[in-house]
Image: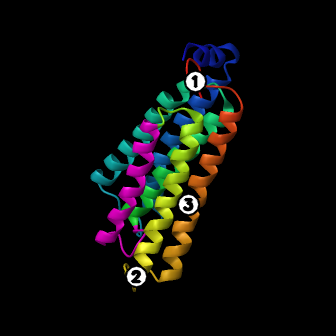
C-alpha cells in the first residue's frame, strides 16, 4: 500500500484524477436537477437525490480504497470500470428495471450479480489474478440472469426477450472488460505488499 501511495504522490497525477472524478460525481448530481428544469419527465424528490448521492459517494469511496491496492493503471482502470458497471446496473435497475419494469421482483436477480462480484472480490483479496476470475464469474452471473429471465418468461411484455438479452449482454461485456483489465494488471506489476 505504501508503494502505491508513494507512486501516486510522486507525480501528482493520482490526485488530479481523483479530484476530476469527485468533480464529475458532483456534476452528475446536478444533471437531474437541470433536467427537472427542462422536462417534466424527470421528477425527482429528496429521496431520489439522497439515494443517488449515496450511490455516488459509495462508488467513489470504494474506488479510493481499492485503488490503494496497486499503482498499476490497468488495475485502477479495472476497478473504475467494475464500479461504474455496478453503479450503472443499480441505477438502471432502480430507475426503469432490467427485467420488466422497476417494480418487477425479477430485478432482484441483478442484486445476485452484484453479490457475486462483491463476494468474489473479497475471496480474491483484491489480488489482480483473483479479481480477473471474480469478474469473469460476475459476467457469467449476468448472463445467467438473462437466461433465467428469458426461459421463465419474466418481464414480459414490458421487456421482450431480445431486450432482456441485449441489456444483460451489454453488462456482461462490461464485466468481461473489467476482468480483462485485471488480467492485464496481473501480468504486470504485483499490487504493493501482496503476492499475485
Residue 172: mark in rendering: 3
Q: Which stretch appears magenta?
A: 96-123
Q: Earlier in the sequence, mark 3 or mark 2?
A: 2
The quarter of the picture where the C terminus appears is: top right
Camera-nearest label, 2 or 1: 1
x, y percent for residue 104? 31, 72
Residue 195: mark in rendering: 1
| In this rendering, position of residue 53 left or right of residue 25 | left
The residues bearing labels 2 and 1 have C-alpha atoms spaced at a distance of: 48 Å
Tell me if mark 3 has few (under 14), some (14-19) or many (20+) residues whose alpha carbon lies within 10 angstroms of its own: many
x, y percent for residue 180? 65, 47
The residues bearing labels 3 and 1 have C-alpha atoms spaced at a distance of: 28 Å
Tell me if mark 1 has few (under 14), some (14-19) or many (20+) residues whose alpha carbon lies within 10 angstroms of its own: few
The quarter of the picture where the N terminus appears is: top right
The residues bearing labels 3 and 2 have C-alpha atoms spaced at a distance of: 21 Å
Q: Any magenta on residue 167?
A: no
| In this rendering, position of residue 153 left or right of residue 180 | left
Residue under label 2, please give it. Answer: 158
x, y percent for residue 145? 43, 67
Amino acid at each position: 500500500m505504501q508503494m502505491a501511495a508513494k507512486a501516486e504522490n510522486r507525480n501528482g497525477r493520482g490526485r488530479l484524477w481523483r479530484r476530476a472524478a469527485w468533480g464529475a460525481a458532483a456534476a452528475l448530481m446536478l444533471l437531474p436537477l437541470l433536467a427537472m428544469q427542462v422536462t417534466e419527465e424527470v421528477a425527482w424528490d429528496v429521496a431520489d437525490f439522497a439515494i443517488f448521492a449515496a450511490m455516488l459517494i459509495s462508488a467513489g469511496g470504494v474506488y479510493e480504497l481499492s485503488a490503494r491496492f496497486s499503482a498499476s493503471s490497468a488495475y485502477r482502470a479495472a476497478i473504475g470500470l467494475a464500479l461504474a458497471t455496478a453503479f450503472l446496473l443499480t441505477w438502471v435497475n432502480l430507475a426503469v428495471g432490467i427485467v420488466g419494469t422497476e417494480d418487477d421482483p425479477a430485478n432482484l436477480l441483478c442484486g445476485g450479480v452484484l453479490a457475486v462480484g462483491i463476494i468474489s472480490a473479497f475471496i480474491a483479496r483484491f489480488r489482480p489474478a483473483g479479481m480477473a476470475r471474480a469478474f469473469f464469474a460476475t459476467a457469467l452471473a449476468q448472463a445467467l440472469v438473462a437466461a433465467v429471465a428469458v426461459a421463465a418468461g419474466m418481464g414480459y411484455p414490458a421487456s421482450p426477450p431480445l431486450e432482456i438479452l441485449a441489456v444483460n449482454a451489454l453488462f456482461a461485456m462490461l464485466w468481461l472488460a473489467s476482468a480483462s483489465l485485471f488480467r492485464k494488471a496481473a501480468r504486470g506489476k504485483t499490487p504493493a505488499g501482496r503476492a499475485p
